[in-house]
Amino acid sequence: MFTEVIPSLQYANSLTDYSRRKTIAVNIGGLPMGSDYPIRIQSMTTIDTMDTEGSIAQTIRMVESGCEYVRITAPSVKEAQNLENIKKGLRARGYDVPLIADIHFTPNAAELAARIVEKVRINPGNYADKKRFETIEYTDASYQQELERIREKFVPLVQICKEYGTAMRIGTNHGSLSDRIMSRYGDSPVGMVESALEFLRICEEFNYYNVVLSMKSSNPLVMVEAYRLLVNRLDEEGLKPYPLHLGVTEAGEGEDGRVKSAVGIGTLLEDGLGDTVRVSLTEDPEFEAPVAKALVARYAQRKAQPAIKPVQELPINPFQYSRRKTHEVYNLGASNVPRVIADLSEVSIEKYEDLRSVGHFYLPAPDKWKMNDQGVDFIYTGSKPVPFMLPMGVKEIIDYKTWLALDDKNNKFPLFNPLEYHLGFSNDAPHSNQLNFLRLNIAQLNPEMIAVLSQTTQTVLVVHTNNPHAMPELRRLFFTLLENKVHCPVVVQRQYATADAEHLALYAATDCGGLLVDGLGDGIMLSVQQTSDTTNAERLKVAATQNSVGFGILQAARTRMSKTEYISCPSCGRTLFDLQETTALIRKRTDHLKGVKIGIMGCIVNGPGEMADADYGYVGIGKDKIALYRGQQVIKKSVAASQAVDELLVLIKEDGRWNEPETIEI
């Protein structure tokens, strides 16, 4: 197995001052992409490409929702040929949107499409290779022969694109790396990058530079590491700085899909990477562009205020996940999963049922509490302590001055501000002998505070910022802790002015997820500013959203699994069943299987490879025919679609991973 030493950690212009990575311009049908232009928005049709009128109508809806480029699948020559009819129909209706042909397995379709549309996307994992999940031993000589074979298949497309002025995306997908790449580099970001570079070197050999690159995965951690490594490698090899297409594959639907997309895409946007964005949701494609636009809009006027101290040397490896070392305080830090704190300081908690919003349910008949998989770990109530005994699964955090007046100081923990903390600990004033929270920002993390924190083993930091360049300032705070060897656990608090569920999910997943994917953070606390006319019922509803988003971010960042995960593709013209309906049905019957990952793929192109992370797979292989997978191994072939969901449940039960769903009666 080939291993690679990474000599440099450089991958962004700056980690403290927002600056987009400088790239060359790539012309795509008169709408150029690159750092001199706005970050472009795109999506992909889901209609059968042979349905000309349907494809035209859907493309128009996508354009009107904000798409600047539209991608259409061309799995064979006949679909590639029909792109011409779709393009003519759009132009006749006054739509000049550049079209992109999506190619898998079929070089002849790519070569035809390159003469028709403005851009072709090829996947280096299956353009010249086939995937049989075999391990192959290569000598340097035999591997070079394989590269010559690839070159022979790929050069004709390069020459056609150059002749016709057609752009190309070399789009690596984590789940469809070839057996050749897997055998030499492993299932890794290094392999993803090398897969693309093999093709890119051929492009540069022929002086063809109208190229966009992508490193997509359904795992946001892998995706982030691969894009960063790609930028690093382009620079090291002296290759041109090509624009980047950002996306998380098979993100899913609803809140989960938005959170997962934002953790991956948002983290890279914060780094100044990315020139076009596609959000892949298992929803109609016209719903994808507004989500992508909301992610991108945050960077239109991004500026750090005040300026953030530059990072001279990275104290982490941005290409390989490693959690920040901390000591354990109560149940935070060290090897504990990150905790979720519900900010209920602006909510009146008066009765048991008010805690339903944060996953704790009181059952009157047996007179006991139950907690679901998203039962919050702590609630922060500020100056308004809960008037009843809390269930055992949740603890309360209270402002220090209010905490001082409490009789019960064992089951409720204080939250200090920096002045209270300095005075309290220097004068041996009352504090918890188990767990103390200290809320501070980067300006308050001064040398005196660092000296105090270096000596304590009972304090958890709650870090926050008002800087518009929020995530980088919080990241800089973590770096300061690392540089000074302060090992206190840290909870990340982000406060937002919007209670809109979608924007809250996108913003929080970017700000908090961008830290978690780098191993920074031992907990999360989301807060929403409330207006005076907001009712308590509305505030509880917002609290429920905050809680759901918090757990979703931890799951997307792969730091705490609290629910079933669905790796479902966004559908396209290759899809062989109603993906949205099937995903909803599978979710309905399996959403209680905590930690189980189920891939739901519309066709074999998005089959076992694209759902590389999944424990089980449901893949369309023909009309009304489904293949069921355990990991990447086919277990049942050609199952009737009407029976496939039941058969999937049988497979899960055979593996001992099934449990009956609990009904919580309120």
Image (cartoon, rainbow, N blue to C red):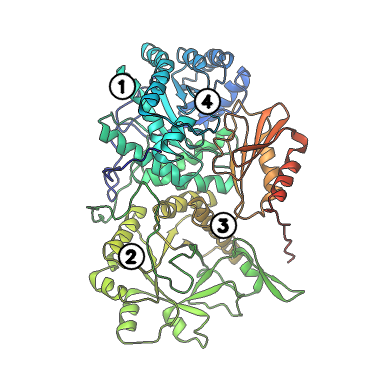
Q: Amino acid at mark 4?
A: Lys
Tag 1 and tag 3, C-beta contact below 8 Å: no
- Residue 251, percent across and down? 54, 42
Is label 1 in a helix, a strand or a loop?
Answer: helix
Q: Amino acid at mark 3?
A: Ser
- Residue 625, percent across and down? 72, 30
Q: Quadrant of the C terminus?
A: bottom right
Marks 4 and 3, how far apart in space? 40 Å
The residue singled out by tag 1 in the image is 204
Q: In the drawing, does residue 72 fall left or right of residue 155?
A: right
Whichever of labels 1 and 3 marks the residue nearer the N terminus, that label is: 1
Q: Amino acid at mark 1?
A: Glu
Find residue 359 and name its label.
none
Whichever of labels 4 and 2 marks the residue nearer the N terminus, that label is: 4
Whichever of labels 4 and 1 marks the residue nearer the N terminus, that label is: 4
Marks 1 and 3, how far apart in space? 47 Å
The relative height of residue 205 versus residue 258 in the rendered view (above or below) is: above
Find residue 548 and name its label.
3
Whichever of labels 2 and 1 marks the residue nearer the N terminus, that label is: 1
Marks 2 and 3, how far apart in space? 25 Å
Is label 2 in a helix, a strand or a loop?
Answer: loop
Q: In the drawing, does residue 492 fall left or right of residue 581?
A: left
